[in-house]
Amino acid sequence: MQLLNSLPANSIELIGYFGSFLTSITFIPQVYKSWKSKSVGDLSTWMVLIVITSTLVWLAYGYLINSGPVLLANTIVLILTLVLLYFKSKFKA
Amino acid sequence: MQLLNSLPANSIELIGYFGSFLTSITFIPQVYKSWKSKSVGDLSTWMVLIVITSTLVWLAYGYLINSGPVLLANTIVLILTLVLLYFKSKFKA
């Protein structure tokens, strides 16, 4: 933790951007797996709906605080989770 | 968007807290569904691993910028996704 505290401010921002990057790509493997298997029975629709709702809230927040990384990450997550919601309606369990 | 721009600063923070709340509860329905069905074959292990990694990055970031909501939300998501990872190893597809 000593090491973390001595980091310069732009290193802290880099860590934030890395977190945004990882959050952005979170649903890529799930969309790929679901598309390949055409099977989504074990996926929680509520999880998908909560993620979609949360990205809309985060997009409003990112717009208000003028944060590019928040807007970008949540746009990508929103698109991927809308695809998952479509898969949930298309591929019946 | 006019309406959004005229919001006072603490309303903006409230939107951020609401986003944090939704992000925190994201994986609760998935853990519940997986626990009930004992079936996790359609869940992407890579998705779970990326979420776990991202929460660790966000926890470092939240510690550095001293953000309670970031620390709280990511601690909850980390615990829930560790449970999902355990389910992935326990409930064979």
Image (tube, coloured by chain):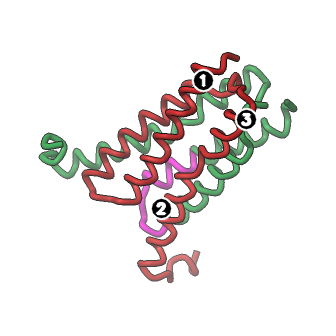
Chain colours: A green, B red
The residue that disc 1 covers is: B88
Asked whether A62 or A19 is in front, the reply is: A19
Q: What distance separates the C-alpha of mark 1 from that of mark 3?
A: 13 Å
Q: Which residues are magenta?
A: A61-76
Residue for point 42% across, 64% down: A66
On the rendered image, what quadrant is the N terminus of chain B found in? bottom right
Q: Earlier in the sequence, mark 1 or mark 3?
A: 3
Q: Is residue B81 above or below residue A49?
A: above
Q: Position of residue A26 (x, y in %)?
A: 54, 36
Kindly identify which chain the residue marked by label 1 belongs to: B
Give the label on residue B36, or none.
Answer: 3
Kindly identify which chain the residue marked by label 2 belongs to: A
Residue for point 68% across, 26% down: B40
Q: Position of residue A18 (x, y in %)?
A: 37, 40
Check disc 2 and give the amino acid type. Gly
Check disc 1 and give the amino acid type. Lys
Identity of the residue furthest to the top in this view:
B92
Residue for point 67% across, 24% down: A33
Give the label on residue B54, or none.
Answer: none
Label 3: state its secondary structure.
Answer: helix
Asked whether A5 or A29 is in front, the reply is: A5
Which of the two discs, 1 and 3, sits closer to the camera? 3
Check disc 3 and give the amino acid type. Lys
Residue under disc 1 on the same chain as residue under disc 3: yes
Q: Position of residue B12 (x, y in %)?
A: 46, 73
Do the numbered discs 2 and 1 sit on residues whose CB atoms are within 8 Å? no
Q: Is residue A19 part of the magenta span, yes or no?
A: no
The residue that disc 2 covers is: A62
Q: Position of residue B52 (x, y in %)?
A: 46, 34
Q: Is residue A75 part of the magenta span, yes or no?
A: yes
Do the numbered discs 1 and 3 sit on residues whose CB atoms are within 8 Å? no
Q: Image check: B40 left or right of A25?
A: right
